[in-house]
Image: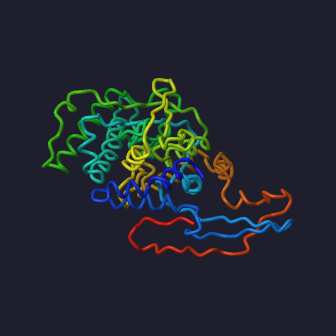
Amino acid sequence: MGHIVEIFRRHGAQYLQNHQRHILPSHRRTIADIRRCRTPVMGGHIYQCSHCDHYHYSYHGCGNRHCPQCQSQATRRWVDQRTEEVMPVPYFHLVFTLPAEFRALVRANQKIAYGILFKAAAESLIKLAADERYLGTRFIGILAVLHTWSRAMLYHPHVHLLVPAVGLSKDGGTVHFSRRQYLVPVKALSNIFRAKFIAKIKAALPEQVIPAAAGKKAWVVFCKHLDLGPQKAIAYLGRYLNRVAVSDARVQRLPDADVRVSYRDDERVKSARLCAQEFLRRYLQHVLPKGFNKVRRYGLFAPCKQVSLLALRHQLLLGELTKPSLVAAKIKPIQQQRWQRCPQCGEGVMSPVRSLVPNYRTRSPPVDIALC
């Protein structure tokens, strides 16, 4: 059991009691799911060794996208689905970040503001890429992932974009820019992104006061050339896709119920000491609204452009260069492979012999549960 799950199980009930009047239903559900993840209340399977008759109980995960224990298999499934879209060219990694002046407004209107952040970032890049002075492409492929945290778990909304170094011109021809070490001018991209986001947020939330200072400062846009093969590129974005606010390796529980979180700042390793309640508060502020899609596709990767994408992939001979098995090999083994050999004797094969039925009601409101 990881440190994060243990913190939720030890201090989650107290957090609910302290904030019972103000806590969001999505936060309450996340606490309940993480606390019962991979416990007897979730049900599971009993495995038996064919050699020494050793039994092993394997309990189901909660499936919550904010649970640190349920992300490896989600990454594998997503990578398998995206294998058909990988281009055999280098990729560019871009990050669009909102200034601090907008954080309070965005947090109070998450569903609307996050959607605008996605659209402003994608439309800015598409507009600049279409300029004949830079790329002159009518369509480029964009995979975008939303993150809302900084390395210290503070609220810091931004989107990561993965863009292949190939596109389609206005006349339907293929445009390669794989030898370029930069995609488009970052300063120009930042100005367009700022103008589009402010215009869209004003139209969507006319009653809100837009920070005047944010419209005068330079917004941070990062762009990096990734000289990766197609297998590594999709696995690279897969790691960004299913991250939670902090990994278990960066969390250390202290004897006095405090928590130490390590993080990098300006290439130096630092740590922050937090009480358990503050750790839970920082973690839960990154829970996304129910039903919000944190991964979006634009340009050639959009669902309506599948015909163009398939034609471009055929032209690039991607089918001969990319092997799905190699992509999947980058991801951790799935549960079935994990228990293939007996952990007791090391010789027998573990086979499921019995199913365990969950003993909680999935449609009931999330409540504090007693773990077995």
Q: Could you tell whether 371 is left or right of 160 in the image?
A: right
Q: Position of residue 357 (x, y in %)?
A: 59, 76
Is residue 170 something that shows in the picture?
A: no
- In the image, is residue 174 above or below residue 185? below
Q: Position of residue 2 (x, y in %)?
A: 58, 49
Q: Give whichever of 148, 153 is nearer the camera.
A: 153
Q: Quadrant of residue 27?
A: bottom left
> For the point 28% across and 40% down, which residue is it?
103
Among all residues in the image, which is located at the extreme front?
256
Q: Give whichever of 158, 153 is nearer the camera.
A: 153
Q: Quadrant of residue 235?
A: top right
> For the point 50% across and 46% down, which residue is it?
243
Q: Give whichever of 160, 37 is nearer the camera.
A: 37
Q: Position of residue 327 (x, y in %)?
A: 64, 48
Q: Give the colour scheme of this rendering.
A: rainbow
Q: Could you tell whether 90 is left or right of 274 in the image?
A: right
Q: Position of residue 120 (x, y in %)?
A: 30, 43
Among all residues in the image, which is located at the extreme left?
207
Q: Quadrant of residue 12?
A: bottom left
Q: Give whichever of 47, 118 is nearer the camera.
A: 47
Is residue 229 something that shows in the picture?
A: yes
Location of the C terminus by quadrant is bottom right
